[in-house]
Image (spheres, rainbow, N blue to C red):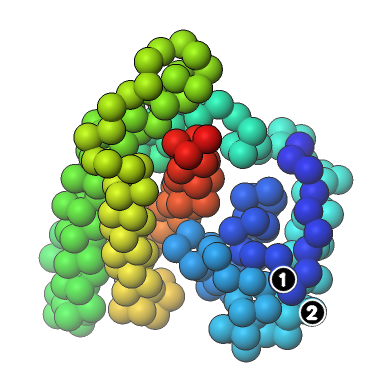
Amino acid sequence: MPTQIQIDERTTVRQLVGRHPETRPVFEKYEIDYCCGGARSLADAAAGCNLQVADLVEVLAEAVETAATTAETPERDWYAAPLDELVEHIVSTHHSYVRTALPRLRSLISKVLNAHRESHGDMLTRVQAYVGALDSELSSHMMKEEQVLFPYIVALESYHREEAARPQAPFGTIRNPVRQMEHEHETAGNALTGLREVTGDYSLPDDACPTFETLYQELERFEGDLHQHIHLENNILFPRAIELESA
Ligand SMILES: [Fe+2]
Ligand SMILES: [Fe+2]
């Protein structure tokens, strides 16, 4: 179990989600961005959603407390795990999920659009456009991570373990590709926000069929997975790799 940290108004969203992944549902509930906006303090995050910071702190502390007493298999402490294991986890869990989920979402959306074009055509066409954009952007994004950035991070770690020579970076400092990846995460995050907006937070219309319902469930699942995926990269993998490079 990761060491507990002090939770108060100065604690950042990033610190908290990193040390206590069990606080993620709280941030999701209040729509507080913990992936790309993770550097904000709890005070700023609370102000952004019209909450009293004391109330937010209390709910978060409760989530941590509950997890500490009920957790059977605590989530891995990715701050301490070897980077090659974190990379392997991201690729085998999240990249592989994205690769199966997006084609499925594309096919679901075409079915729902065909059946409901008359009454919900405009909205569903926008959903389709967001899913299409996510599909093409994330495919090339993940390929860059898997072929360039992640192998460099793994090689850098081997060098620090004195198992291999220092790798040659084809991109100057690692901060360059990291900046690019973070920018692409932000674009994907904006598409998720756009999807929530056009679907009214995934509220189903009265005439929704079971496929419509499945589409919304799968989109919400996709959102949850992508948030966790981006969180692991932005808040843990990238900062640890930058630190290793400058060590
Ligand atoms: Fe990734
Ligand atoms: Fe990424």
Residue at 43% x, 32% y: name it.
87
Residue tagged 1: 10
51 lies above or below 104: below
Where residue 90 appears, as percent x and y from the top left, is: 43, 36
Q: Nearer the viewer, residue 70 or 205?
A: 70
SS at circle 1: loop
Where residue 225 appears, as percent x and y from the top left, is: 45, 50
Please tell me in which quadrant of the rendered image residue 106 appears.
bottom left
Amino acid beneath label 2: Ala
Q: Nearer the viewer, residue 179 or 169?
A: 169
Q: Nearer the viewer, residue 138 or 130?
A: 138
Where residue 53 appears, as percent x and y from the top left, is: 73, 80
Residue tagged 2: 54
Instruction: Please tell me how many numbered marks the rendered image carries.
Output: 2
Amino acid beneath label 1: Arg
- Crowd tier of the residue under label 2, counting other residues whose Cα lies within 10 Å: few below 14, some 14–19, many 20 or above: some
In the image: residue 18, left or right of residue 121: right
Please tell me in which quadrant of the rendered image residue 205 appears.
bottom left
Quarter of the image that includes the N terminus: top right
* Residue placed furthest toward the top: 163
Residue at 60% x, 29% y: name it.
81
